[in-house]
Amino acid sequence: MELLNKNICFDGEQRIYQTQSQTLKGPTKFAVFIPPQALNGQKCPALYYLAGLTCTEETFIIKAHAQRLAAQLGLILIAPDTSPRGDAVAQGDSWDLGQGAGFYLNATQAPWAEHFQMESYIVEELYPLLIQELPIQAEAIGVFGHSMGGHGALTLAWKYPEKFKSVSAFAPICAPCECPWGEKAFSNYLGQDRIEWAKHDATQLLLTKGPLFDEVLIDQGTDDQFYSQLNPEKYQQACEQVGQKLSLRFQKGYDHGYYFIQSFIDDHLQFHAIQLQK
Amino acid sequence: MELLNKNICFDGEQRIYQTQSQTLKGPTKFAVFIPPQALNGQKCPALYYLAGLTCTEETFIIKAHAQRLAAQLGLILIAPDTSPRGDAVAQGDSWDLGQGAGFYLNATQAPWAEHFQMESYIVEELYPLLIQELPIQAEAIGVFGHSMGGHGALTLAWKYPEKFKSVSAFAPICAPCECPWGEKAFSNYLGQDRIEWAKHDATQLLLTKGPLFDEVLIDQGTDDQFYSQLNPEKYQQACEQVGQKLSLRFQKGYDHGYYFIQSFIDDHLQFHAIQLQK
């Protein structure tokens, strides 16, 4: 873990690290906010934030405005990049495929499979590394995210409930098997077999595995310009079907961007702080 | 005023406008945060934020994390661009001169004088325009800023105390006549006559005009990478000399960037809210 940047922020530290990832086969960056409690030697709960299409490890730490309350609550915030990067990595034809669009899964198809292993990178490489290197309470780690990263949060939580104790999302892609973003990404990364796709679809995973968390919190703006890609109603219906408690809040007038996220970030941090203390 | 963007944020609106400026002789943008109280028809106090070198009208609204408390306090936030822009405007040789480096004064020297009239643009054009177009309490307008914009806030407040009722700054350039940034900008924009320079130097203005505000709030990081350009001690000394009440807070470990600003933005908003209510 090479420390690239460190800025004092709310008496904590906003850091950016780089590592040579075995899983992604190349360098990758991630951001970590260390609250003052952790600087003072106390082990703290941690929260992974998975960002959306086109974002990097810097998007959340600049635009989501989470540090103030995280410093108060004593939450470590971890924000990985959204894909492998670099000249050696396949670029993709557009902003919704390839670099900046890793979809938090392991690609099986060429040319993606070589580097696009974001699922394994996060849960098998970064997750244990940070428990080892940072003052994290290993039994108190949550995950949340936005859009593609909301899909990432909901799917990783359902795939690895032993690793994540709490989960929430902003405007997540709830049913990627049934929207253009998901269809494009899954057909490229996973091939044409839709049975494989279903293993990476939040709504399908929920229907297959059933309820796994005390509560899931989702905020969704009613004026989201990408609403047709997101399908929150399908996820809500699946939650009702299997008996998963869901707080799906439709926020009137809000769109898909970080002005929406910053408006409700405090609610999500409070939600995780409570779930992680249980 | 052409509305380019509008995002709901904390039940207020984060807007970006463009106007054709007579003063700058070209198009210019500015950001306005309208708190929910103002959306509901209530006139609200307003606060101008002047940004630093290289920044635009977007820097503050993305990085300073001011909207949450401004929405609670009912403060309108106004963030102009830091210079005239465009192909017709002189570029400058570097990031500390020309576009992105207007220094909130009226240039008198070629090639700058044609467009670089940021002082008149803000106080004679934007200021009355926004009182006319937005629900602003005209008698309750404050100004604050960062670095070059801290210089802008302190100098505009001292030049136009009838327009600004409160003033604060983050890491301001307190004595531009005596630092490389100021010497470069002033010699280019104003020529070689240092008597002219003194009219745009916060410390000199304070010594000439004496105390004008109940209190001035300045936050300064002790690990500021540009500390040698800023001279807060000279400003403090001048305040003591003329009897201007100053809260100069040295914030241990903080640097020059927006992680510093976001850590103390709430204190500044609270400070202005109190001053503007007097």
Image: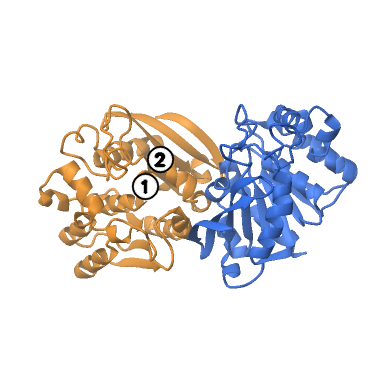
Chain colours: A orange, B blue
Measured from the top left, where is residue A120 in percent x and y?
Answer: 24, 39
Residue type at mark 2? Glu
The quarter of the image holding the N terminus of chain B is bottom right
Give the chain letter at badge 2. A
Give the chain letter at badge 1. A
Q: Is mark 1 on a helix, strand or loop?
A: loop
Q: Is mark 2 on a helix, strand or loop?
A: loop
Q: In this view, does A196 lie to the left or right of B120?
A: left
Quarter of the figure with residue B93: top right
Q: Mark 2 points at which residue?
A: A57
- Which is nearer the eye, B85 or B134? B85
Q: Which residue in the rendered view is the most extreme toward the bottom?
A: B41
Q: Name the residue under label 1.
A: A51
Residue A74 seen in this snapshot: no
Distance of mark 1 from mark 2, alpha carbons?
A: 8 Å
- Which is nearer the eye, B200 or B115? B115
- Which is nearer the eye, B26 or B198? B26
Measured from the top left, where is residue B50 in percent x and y?
Answer: 66, 46
Q: Report whether mark 1 lies on the same chain as mark 2.
A: yes
Please, is residue B252 above or below residue B216 in the view?
Answer: above
Are discs 1 and 2 less than 8 Å apart at CB? Answer: yes
Quarter of the figure with residue B232: top right
Measured from the top left, where is residue A44 in percent x and y?
Answer: 44, 47
Q: How many marks?
A: 2
10 Å crowding of disc 1: few (<14), some (14-19), many (20+): many
